[in-house]
C-alpha cells in the first residue's frame, strides 16, 4: 500500500486549492493541528480511515465557507423534474442534499459515502426525514437499481476515485434516461494534458481532470457532456446527460 505520509506543506497546498476556511477559534485550530498530524501518520494507509477520523471537525473546516459558496453556485445550474429522485455520491455530512431538499420541496434524495462517521453526522443533521436517507457504500459498486435516479451529484469527491471509469459506468447505470450528472471538482490542469494530474495530498493521492478529460471519461460511459461552468476559482462544474431512449 502506498505510504500515506504527508508533509505540512502538502496539506497547506491542499487547503489553498480548496479555497481555505473561515477564521477558526482556538478549539478549531487545535482540531486542524490534529488533522495535520493524522495526515502525516503512517497508520493512514487508506482514505476511508482518513475521512472517518476527519468527520468530527469536517464541518468546521469546509462547508461553513467553501462548500456553502460552491453549493450556492451549483444550485443555479441544477435542473430537476418534479418530483425528483437524486443521489449524492461522496455526500459527506449531507450539506448538499439538505440544500437541495430546501430548494426542491418535492425532492427525494439518497446520500452515499464510505465513511460511517460522516454518515452518522449526516443522519444527525437530517432536517428532511423521510425525504432524505443516507447509506454506506462505494461509488464503484452502487447498491441501486438501473435507472433509479433523475440526477446524480458528485462534489469534490470524484478526484479521490482510483477507478473513475468504473464510477462513471455505475453513475450512467443508475441514471434514468435523460437524467443529469453534476460533477463538481477542482481543475488546475492544462487542456492539452493527456492524463489527469496526480497530487500526493491524501493517501493514494487525488486526481484532477481537465474539461477534455472529463468529456472523454463521460463518453466512455455513454454520457453526453453538455457544458462546463467555473463556480469558484478552480472549481469546475461539468454537466452530463444520459441520452433518452
Image: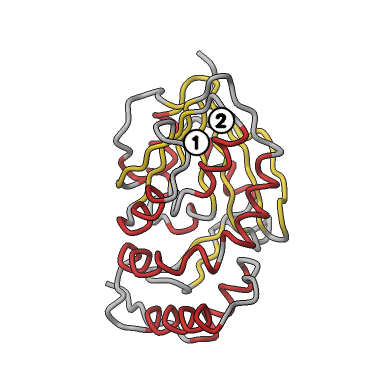
Where residue 152 is drawn, which disc sits there?
1
Where residue 103 is drawn, which disc sits there?
none
Against 43, residue 92 (above or below) is above
Where residue 180 is drawn, which disc sits there?
2
The quadrant of the picture occupied by the N terminus is: bottom left
Q: Quick one: 212 or 179, which is closer to the camera?
A: 179
* Disc 2 packing (10 Å; few <14; some 14–19; many ≥20): many
Against 152, residue 56 (above or below) is below
Q: Measuring 36% from the left and 69% from the top, which residue is drawn there?
A: 50
- Tell me where residue 180 sits by quadrant: top right
Q: Measuring 33% from the left and 53% from the top, which residue is drawn there?
A: 114
Q: Measuring 40% from the left and 69% from the top, which residue is drawn there?
A: 54
Classify residue 133 as left or right of residue 214.
Answer: left
* Disc 1 packing (10 Å; few <14; some 14–19; many ≥20): many
Classify residue 122 as left or right of residue 192.
Answer: left
Q: Horizontal and vertical percent for residue 20? A: 63, 71
Q: Measuring 40% from the left and 29% from the top, which residue is drawn there?
A: 174
Q: Are marks 2 and 1 in contact (CB under 8 Å)?
A: yes
Q: Horizontal and vertical percent for residue 82? A: 57, 19
Against 213, residue 83 (above or below) is above
Classify residue 120 as left or right of residue 26.
Answer: left
Against 94, residue 202 (above or below) is below
Amino acid at each position: 500500500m502506498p505510504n500515506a505520509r504527508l508533509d505540512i506543506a502538502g496539506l497547506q497546498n491542499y487547503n489553498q486549492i480548496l479555497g481555505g476556511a473561515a477564521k477558526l477559534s482556538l478549539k478549531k485550530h487545535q482540531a486542524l493541528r490534529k488533522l495535520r498530524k493524522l495526515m502525516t501518520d503512517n497508520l493512514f494507509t487508506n482514505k476511508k480511515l482518513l475521512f472517518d477520523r476527519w468527520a468530527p471537525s469536517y464541518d468546521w473546516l469546509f462547508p461553513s465557507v467553501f462548500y456553502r459558496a460552491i453549493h450556492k453556485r451549483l444550485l443555479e445550474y441544477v435542473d430537476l423534474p418534479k418530483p425528483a429522485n437524486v443521489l449524492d455520491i461522496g455526500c459527506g455530512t449531507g450539506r448538499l442534499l439538505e440544500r437541495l431538499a430546501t430548494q426542491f420541496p418535492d425532492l427525494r434524495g439518497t446520500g452515499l459515502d464510505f465513511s460511517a462517521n460522516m454518515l452518522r453526522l449526516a443522519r444527525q443533521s437530517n432536517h428532511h426525514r423521510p425525504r432524505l436517507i443516507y447509506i454506506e457504500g462505494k461509488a464503484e459498486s452502487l447498491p441501486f437499481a438501473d435507472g433509479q435516479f433523475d440526477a446524480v451529484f458528485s462534489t469534490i469527491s470524484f478526484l479521490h476515485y482510483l477507478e473513475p471509469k468504473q464510477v462513471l459506468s455505475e453513475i450512467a447505470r443508475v441514471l434514468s434516461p435523460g437524467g443529469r450528472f453534476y460533477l463538481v471538482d477542482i481543475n488546475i490542469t492544462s487542456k492539452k494534458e493527456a492524463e489527469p494530474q496526480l497530487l500526493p495530498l491524501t493517501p493514494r493521492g487525488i486526481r484532477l481532470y481537465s474539461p477534455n478529460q472529463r468529456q472523454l471519461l463521460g463518453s466512455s460511459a455513454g454520457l453526453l457532456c453538455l457544458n462546463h461552468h467555473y463556480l469558484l476559482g478552480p472549481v469546475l462544474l461539468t454537466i452530463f446527460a444520459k441520452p433518452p431512449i
